[in-house]
Amino acid sequence: MGNNFFTDKTLLLEAGNTYLLEITGMIEMSYSESWFVGMDENGLKHLIPASVYACYGINPGSRIMCRLDKINCQGRFFFEPKHPEYSEGKSYGFELVKIVKCSGLCSKYAAVVKDVFGNEILTRCFDASGPLPHNLDTIECYVHRIKKAVPYLQVTDKRLIGS
């Protein structure tokens, strides 16, 4: 007989790949938890926490690209909707809030920046190339990853880290 599961040619979803989900509705699990219901190309439904992606402009009827981050041991799928402004692997200008010293590290600093939604984000630590400039409004940061709507950033601005 063999192991010919999925002979009906349905799409096998794999972690790390991106898929189109159609948002078919919303459900509330409790008074404080709402979830988008996303249907994949196989007709399977998946839940995406609405509060995490509230500023993405997702509504029932939306068709959104999502990266499948993982499938846990219980078979639950964890999707990351495509960020409306940022893409992983690219650099962007971010509003600089302040530069802080990384705790316990003499010459390392991190930047606190604001994203397009006004959320404050702490970057990875970086080595300063010299005295820190005090008149910066924006700095360039590289987006390593986006998880639960939060960009993980590394400062790439030459005014701070040198060449």
Image (cartoon, grey):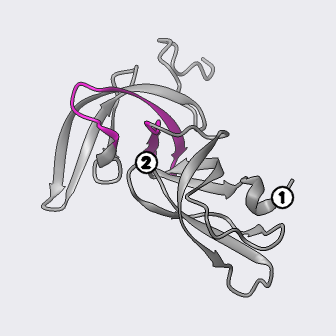
Q: Position of residue 129 (x, y in %)?
A: 83, 66
The image shows residue 136, relative to residue 12, as above or below, that is below
Query: In the depicted view, which residue is nearer to us: 85 or 62?
Result: 85
Q: Residues within 10 Å of mark 2 (few under 14, many from 20)?
A: few
- Residue 160: x and y, percent? 74, 62
Measuring 79% from the left and 69% from the top, which residue is drawn there? 128
The circle drawn on residue 116 is 2
Q: Is residue 51 visible?
A: yes
Q: Which residues are magenta?
A: 56-84
Horizontal and vertical percent position of residue 87: 57, 37
Q: Are marks 2 and 1 in contact (CB under 8 Å)?
A: no
Residue 68 colored in magenta in the image: yes
Foreground pick, 56 / 14: 56
Q: Earlier in the sequence, mark 2 or mark 1?
A: 2
Quarter of the image that includes the N terminus = top right
As helix, strand or loop, the secondary structure at mark 2 comes to loop
**Mark number, residue 162:** 1
Query: At 55% from the left edge and 52% from the top edge, which residue is drawn?
Result: 94
Q: Nearer the viewer, mark 2 or mark 1?
A: 1
Mark yes or no: residue 49 visible.
no
Which residue lies most toward the top here?
A: 8
Between 2 and 102, the one lying in front of the other is: 102
Q: Is residue 111 above or below residue 77?
A: below
Q: Amino acid at mark 2?
A: Val
Q: Is residue 117 left or right of residue 140?
A: left
Kind of element beneath mark 1: loop
Horizontal and vertical percent position of residue 100:
62, 77
- Left or right: residue 109 versus residue 63 is right
- Number of marks in the image? 2
Q: Residue furthest front?
A: 135
**Quarter of the image where one finds residue 158:** bottom right
